[in-house]
């Protein structure tokens, strides 16, 4: 028998050769067992990021990551339970709105969320900004929360795809995040381990996402769907805009606050519209609604206050004071730097990647794995693309947290991320494509 040689496998992948499923599984198993060091794993990640991987290799990687941990298969525990996942963006708080909104319509939602990656925010980091909120739940607690209040958002526990957790950390610091096979295996190993009845994938596209153009977003979407081959989970996907941040708030505590504003019927139109569209697909997939009754139910849940009440019950079920978000008790920094328009006109562009990177520097995300976040820091985009502004209007605010900051430098950096034109830009297209299951 030929001895397993990480060195040979690395050389072959570097040359662009396809690896066998057994070689990929062997590499991941040995890495998980501590027999392959981080530097060899990082080399494989870089080789895959550069050379790509075919569908069989991507499937093998997904299955190897899945097999490194537990498999919860929550679909077997409930009549129907939905999951939702975003490939990552800036200002993306859709999950925080969607879970209670859908649950308020009588359809269960269970999600496992992660920390921010690269310049993108993470739902777990946002939830960690709510005093008392417990995201680290056991499987039994996760189930109990769904039983009690109809929705839950927890973090991927140690048990779910532990190999992905270590790969994720390596990718974050080795420039290997933006790779379709690596993103696919990372996301789908966790989604398949959770095993919901249905999953909505929000594939973000634009300069604030890992896919910058439609062609790449389509390739990622197809790859994500293919990696679920043979699973019981029904999958739908949407390619959605991330060429500017979603909503007004970018950060952590400020995004939670905005999510509850949307539940209360007041939040920004883009967050509302996108969440409503994804929530409607979940209601349809549950088999209890068609598209138009789903939208009616969602609108009624919000206008009647049921969605907000559901949000509060969900917070309480996961240990937080339900009034903490609605009474403005979140730790949002009040020390702000205002950015004003230097001329009249129309906001024509907001650089989502730049906003994401600035948010990291403010303490909303990590530069290094062990960085401690400043949940109160953030950015408020008071004016969005298409808005008309007058010279001197406040167009954005930076919420300075605990980090020392040069206010003038922050002001000019933020101003450079927002373009003002003399003509209104074309209307923003929020949803590019929807990949539906046959109904
Ligand atoms: N989300 C994940 O869980 N993994 C990735 O690689 C990208 C986004």
Image (cartoon, rainbow, N blue to C red):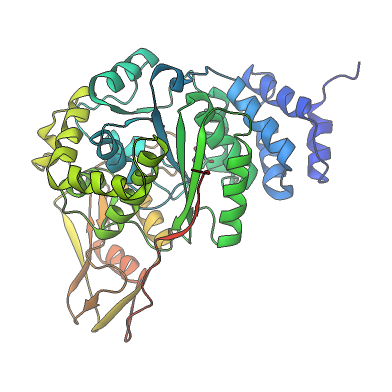
User: Please, is residue 237 above or below residue 185 in the view?
Assistant: below
| The N terminus, quarter of image | top right
Q: Residue at x 36, y 73 (%)?
A: 427
**At which x and y percent is residue 35?**
69, 18
Residue 276 visible within the image: yes
Q: Residue furthest left?
A: 327
User: Please, is residue 425 above or below residue 182 in the view?
Assistant: below
Q: Residue at x 74, y 36 (%)?
A: 56
**At which x and y percent is residue 267?**
20, 54
Residue 179 visible within the image: no
Left or right, 45 with reference to 390 = right
Left or right, 403 with reference to 244 = left
Which residue is nearer to you in this view: 147 or 134? 147
Image quarter of residue 79: top left
Which residue is nearer to you in this view: 253 or 411? 253
User: Please, is residue 294 above or below residue 165 in the view?
Assistant: below
Left or right, 324 with reference to 255 = left
Q: Residue at x 14, y 35 (%)?
A: 309
Q: Residue furthest top?
A: 140
User: Please, is residue 214 above or below residue 294 in the view?
Assistant: below
Q: Residue furthest right?
A: 1
Image quarter of residue 316: top left
Q: Residue at x 19, y 33 (%)?
A: 310
Image quarter of residue 188: top right
Left or right, 238 with reference to 141 = right
**At which x and y percent is residue 243?**
43, 63
Q: Residue furthest bottom?
A: 422
């Amino acid at each position: 028998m030929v001895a397993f040689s990480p060195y040979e496998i690395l050389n072959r992948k570097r040359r662009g050769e396809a690896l066998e499923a057994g070689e990929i599984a062997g590499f991941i198993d040995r890495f998980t067992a501590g027999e392959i060091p981080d530097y060899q794993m990082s080399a494989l990640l870089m080789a895959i990021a550069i050379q790509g991987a075919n569908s069989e290799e991507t499937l093998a990687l997904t299955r190897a990551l899945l097999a490194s941990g537990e498999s919860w298969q929550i679909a077997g525990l409930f009549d129907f339970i939905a999951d939702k996942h975003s490939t990552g963006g800036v200002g993306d708080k859709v999950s925080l709105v969607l879970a209670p909104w859908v649950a308020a319509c009588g359809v269960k939602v269970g999600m496992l969320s992660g920390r921010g990656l690269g310049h993108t925010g993470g739902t777990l980091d946002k939830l960690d900004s709510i005093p008392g909120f417990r995201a680290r739940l056991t499987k039994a607690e996760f189930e109990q929360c769904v039983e009690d209040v109809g929705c839950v958002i927890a973090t991927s526990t140690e048990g779910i795809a532990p190999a992905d957790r270590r790969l994720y950390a390596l990718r974050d610091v080795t420039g290997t995040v933006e790779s379709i096979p690596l993103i696919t295996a990372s996301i789908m190993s966790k989604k398949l381990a959770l095993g919901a009845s249905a999953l909505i994938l929000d594939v973000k596209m634009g300069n604030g996402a890992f896919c910058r153009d439609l062609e790449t977003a389509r390739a990622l979407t197809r790859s994500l769907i293919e990696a679920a081959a043979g699973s019981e989970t029904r999958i739908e996907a949407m390619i959605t805009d991330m060429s500017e941040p979603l909503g007004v708030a970018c950060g952590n505590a400020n995004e939670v606050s905005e999510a509850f504003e949307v539940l209360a019927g007041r939040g920004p139109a883009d967050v509302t519209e996108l969440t409503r569209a994804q929530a409607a697909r979940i209601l349809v997939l549950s088999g209890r609604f068609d598209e138009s009754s789903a939208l009616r139910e969602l609108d009624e849940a919000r206008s009647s206050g049921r969605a907000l009440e559901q949000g509060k019950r969900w917070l309480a079920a996961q240990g937080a004071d339900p009034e903490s978000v609605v009474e403005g008790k979140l730790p949002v920094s009040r020390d702000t730097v205002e950015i004003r328009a230097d001329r009249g006109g129309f906001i024509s562009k907001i650089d989502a990647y730049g906003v994401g990177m600035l948010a990291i520097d403010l303490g909303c995300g990590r530069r290094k794995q062990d960085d401690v976040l400043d949940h109160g820091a953030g950015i408020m985009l008071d004016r969005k693309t298409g808005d008309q502004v007058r010279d001197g209007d406040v167009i954005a605010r930076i919420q300075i947290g605990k980090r020392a900051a040069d206010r003038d430098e922050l002001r000019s950096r933020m101003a450079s991320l927002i373009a003002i034109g003399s003509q209104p830009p074309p209307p923003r297209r929020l949803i590019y494509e929807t990949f539906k299951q046959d109904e």
